[in-house]
Image (cartoon, grey):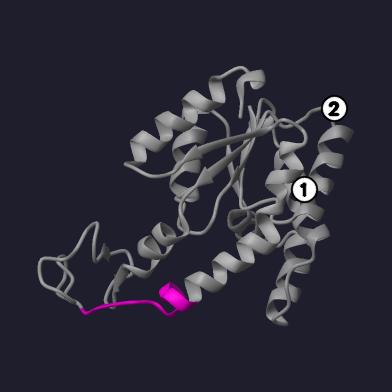
């Protein structure tokens, strides 16, 4: 299956992408991974992207699209892929459509993870990170430490990252609504959108997604 995963920040896209890709036996292709791989390998596209990033500029759509096309052409993606974080806007979506059409393939579904905005804010703004080891992550509601402000693992101080503040999260949500969310209507016009609730346990969301993807396209709403 060829799938695009869409959802607001805090919807759990990265986690679900990993589980779904494994269940579907297709590679998980994320924008972040594409950038890191191309830059670390010193590819022509990686050098272009690094030059823009070092200058503090956004990487142009054409560079991101070229990276995605190159990755989708790899042997392990012959029978499908799961795109996470791409396309980010309607322009990229149209370019992806054109690239896939040129290759004689099309998307099978666009999986839209739906989460209420207040829940997104709660999920992200409630995160606390250990200053000693950023791998130690807690949540004030869902996985609180035994002692407030103290890491259960190493005793380090727990803090809230600047980009996890409620104000920053709401700004990120506004960017999502303005730039990325419109691709849902773009793909809905092609009868590709599958919308599911991303509330609940990780395994429940995965099962919900798999069930929705396995339905006949005609039954999608």
Q: Is residue 210 above or below residue 197?
A: above
Is residue 35 in view? yes
Mark 1 burial class by Cα count in 10 Å: few <14, some 14-19, many 20+: many
Where, by quadrant of the figure, is residue 200 drawn?
A: top left
Specify start and end residues of the magenta stretch as a single range. 157-167
Taking depth in this image into account, of 131 and 150 the one nearest to the observer is: 150
Tell me where residue 5 appears, x and y as whole percent: 59, 43
**Residue 148 belongs to the span the image colors magenta:** no
Q: Residue at x 72, y 62 (%)?
A: 46
Quarter of the figure with the C terminus: top right
Mark 2 burial class by Cα count in 10 Å: few <14, some 14-19, many 20+: few
Residue 93: image tag: 1
Mark nearer the N terminus (1 vs 2): 1
**Residue 164 belongs to the span the image colors magenta:** yes
| Left or right of residue 111: residue 44 | right
Tell me where residue 3 appears, x and y as whole percent: 63, 35
Question: Which residue is denoted by mark 2 in the rendering?
Answer: 104
Is residue 70 in view? no
């Amino acid at each position: 299956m060829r799938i695009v995963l869409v959802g607001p920040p805090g919807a759990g896209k990265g986690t679900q992408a990993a589980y779904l890709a494994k269940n579907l036996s297709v590679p998980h292709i994320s924008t972040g991974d594409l950038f890191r791989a191309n830059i670390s390998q010193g590819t022509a596209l990686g050098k272009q992207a690094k030059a823009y990033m070092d200058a503090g500029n956004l990487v142009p759509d054409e560079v991101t699209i070229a990276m995605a096309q190159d990755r989708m052409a790899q042997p392990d993606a012959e029978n499908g892929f799961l795109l996470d974080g791409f396309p980010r806007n309607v322009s990229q979506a149209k370019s992806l459509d054109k690239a896939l059409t040129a290759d004689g393939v099309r998307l099978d579904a666009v999986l839209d993870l739906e989460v209420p905005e207040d829940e997104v804010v709660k999920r992200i703004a409630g995160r606390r990170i250990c200053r000693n080891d950023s791998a130690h992550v807690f949540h004030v509601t869902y996985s609180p430490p035994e002692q407030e402000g103290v890491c259960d693992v190493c005793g380090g101080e727990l803090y809230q990252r600047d980009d996890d503040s409620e104000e920053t999260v709401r700004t990120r949500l506004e960017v999502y609504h303005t730039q990325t969310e419109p691709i849902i209507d773009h793909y809905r016009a092609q009868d590709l959108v599958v919308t599911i609730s991303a509330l609940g346990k990780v395994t429940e969301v995965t099962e919900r997604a798999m069930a929705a993807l396995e339905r006949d396209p005609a039954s999608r709403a």
